[in-house]
Image (spheres, rainbow, N blue to C red):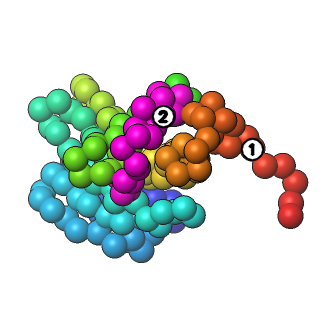
Amino acid sequence: MSLTEQFMHIDDIDPIDIVEHLAEHHEWDFDRIAEDRIAMVVDGQWRTYSISLSWAPREECLRLVSTFELAPPEERLPELYEVLNAANDACWAGAFTYWDEPKLMVYRYGLVLAGGYVAGPEQIDRMIASAVAAAERFYPAFQLVCWGGRTPADAMQVAIAEAYGTA
């Protein structure tokens, strides 16, 4: 049964209810923090990502924030910001930012559902998968800039290169 079929007969679908169902489906650890907010942990290849989604009915926006710890050396922050700009140029949905005080790399995305539109399970699942994919894609570039001594342009070559064939 597809994810959509499980919600076919519900007239007023709460997006956070859908996220909770997806977390159960994928067997992710999650916590329903409030009626309009959920936090979960999703494992990637490089990191474990803390992902929270919140529904803002007034703005009609489903907000996703995905974070992972990153504590670069202070002297490498200018290069980190430069590689963040390059990564954001390559992201069409969502954007990275670095929160210095809690030492977190953050990927944010907002899905506007104005006019009474409802996000379906496949759309929300894709939203979460895209956040993890973006973090996985650019994580090596962030690492190379912060601790590998590479230039942002050099590090971005790793992020934009695609592997071909099999090993």
Q: Position of residue 116 (x, y in %)?
A: 24, 31
Asked if residue 18 shows in the view, the reply is: no
The answer to whether residue 165 is left or right of residue 153 is: right
Q: Residue at x 53, y 28 (%)?
A: 86
Whole-angstrom CA distance, mark 1 to mark 2, is 23 Å
What secondary structure characterizes most of the magenta part?
Answer: helix
**Where does label 2 land, which residue?**
79
The quarter of the displayed image where residue 108 is located: top left
Q: Position of residue 36 (x, y in %)?
A: 15, 52
The answer to whether residue 10 is left or right of residue 147 is: left
**Where does label 1 land, which residue?**
162
The residue type indicated by label 2 comes to Glu
The answer to whether residue 81 is left or right of residue 159 is: left
Residue 85 belongs to the span the image colors magenta: yes
Q: Which residues are magenta?
A: 67-87
Q: Residue at x 42, y 74 (%)?
A: 27
- Judge depth for marks 1 and 2 and give the one in front: 2
Residue 20 belongs to the span the image colors magenta: no
The quarter of the displayed image where residue 109 is located: top left
The quarter of the displayed image where residue 138 is located: top right
Q: Is residue 28 above or below residue 159?
A: below
The residue type indicated by label 1 comes to Glu
Which secondary structure lies at badge 1? loop
Which secondary structure lies at badge 2? helix
Q: Is residue 23 above or below residue 123?
A: below
Q: Position of residue 167 (x, y in %)?
A: 86, 64
